[in-house]
């Protein structure tokens, strides 16, 4: 067996093959000067950027103006809504106070000169017959003959419909 000594690379065949090969020379780089970069921006690009910048700033200002106007309209509408709600409460309470039974009765008595009707001022009409109107002096609910007549009229009407 062999020892652990380091082996020489030249002893191997592939190293002998490459000993005689020339190494290629590194290429030489040459710098050619072409067009020189311009020192400033072209006027066309400058004008285009300026126009774009003005358009964006104008759009932002217009947007802010519209938002302020809409905010003012909204606050005006809210204030008007609150005013209308308070007016509704006022008018509703005024209506309830004026439409109470005591107020209606006092208005009818004082302004219109009206009063409660007496029994002799009332006239009852019986409209149960066909085209016939009969005048009665008594209330139809209290007179026994009227009750019988109304019952008979109701029976006749019931029979005609069936």
Image (cartoon, rainbow, N blue to C red):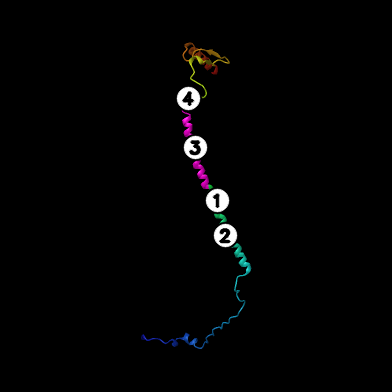
Bin the neighbour count of mark 2 within 10 Å (Cα to Cα): few under 14, some 14-19, many 20 and up: few
Q: Name which of mark 3 and mark 1 comes first in the sequence.
A: 1
Residue at position x 49%, y 38% in the image: 87
Q: Disc 1, disc 4: CB below 8 Å?
A: no
Q: Name which of mark 2 and mark 1 comes first in the sequence.
A: 2
Q: Disc 2, disc 1: CB below 8 Å?
A: no
Bin the neighbour count of mark 3 within 10 Å (Cα to Cα): few under 14, some 14-19, many 20 and up: few
Secondary structure of the residue carrying tag 4 is helix
Q: Is residue 84 visible?
A: yes
Residue 60 vertical position relative to residue 141 in the rendered view, above or below: below
Q: Disc 4, disc 2: CB below 8 Å?
A: no
Instruction: State how far apart marks 2 and 3 are (Cα).
Output: 47 Å
Residue at position x 46%, y 31% in the image: 97
Kindly identify which numbered label has been placed on residue 106: 4
Secondary structure of the residue carrying tag 1 is helix
Identify which residue, 119 or 133, lies in the foreground: 119
Q: Range of the magenta residues?
A: 74-100
Residue 30 vs residue 107: left or right?
Answer: right
Secondary structure of the residue carrying tag 3 is helix
User: Does the segment drawn in magenta span residue 49?
Assistant: no
Kindly identify which numbered label has been placed on residue 69: 1
Q: Disc 3, disc 1: CB below 8 Å?
A: no
Residue 76 screen position, x and y as percent: 52, 46
Residue 3 vertical position relative to residue 99 in the rendered view, above or below: below
User: Does the segment drawn in magenta span residue 77?
Assistant: yes
Instruction: State how far apart marks 4 and 3 are (Cα).
Output: 26 Å
Name the residue tied to disc 2.
57
Name the residue tied to disc 3.
88
Kindly identify which numbered label has been placed on residue 22: none
Q: Name which of mark 2 and mark 3 comes first in the sequence.
A: 2
Instruction: State how far apart marks 3 and 1 are (Cα).
Output: 28 Å
Residue 40 vertical position relative to residue 93 in the rendered view, above or below: below
């Amino acid at each position: 067996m062999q020892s652990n000594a380091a082996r020489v690379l030249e002893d191997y065949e592939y190293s002998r093959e490459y000993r005689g090969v020339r190494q290629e020379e590194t290429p030489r780089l040459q710098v050619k000067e072409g067009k020189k970069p311009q020192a400033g921006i072209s006027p066309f690009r400058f004008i285009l950027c300026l126009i774009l910048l003005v358009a964006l700033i104008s759009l932002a200002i217009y947007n802010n103006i519209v938002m302020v106007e809409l905010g003012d309209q909204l606050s005006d509408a809210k204030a008007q809504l609150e005013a209308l709600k308070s007016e509704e409460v006022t008018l509703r309470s005024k209506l309830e106070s004026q439409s109470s039974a005591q107020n209606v009765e006092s208005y009818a008595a004082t302004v219109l000169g009206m009063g409660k009707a007496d029994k002799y001022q009332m006239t009852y009409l019986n409209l149960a017959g066909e085209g016939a109107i009969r005048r009665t002096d008594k209330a139809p609910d209290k007179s026994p003959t009227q009750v019988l007549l109304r019952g008979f009229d109701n029976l006749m009407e019931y029979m005609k419909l069936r």
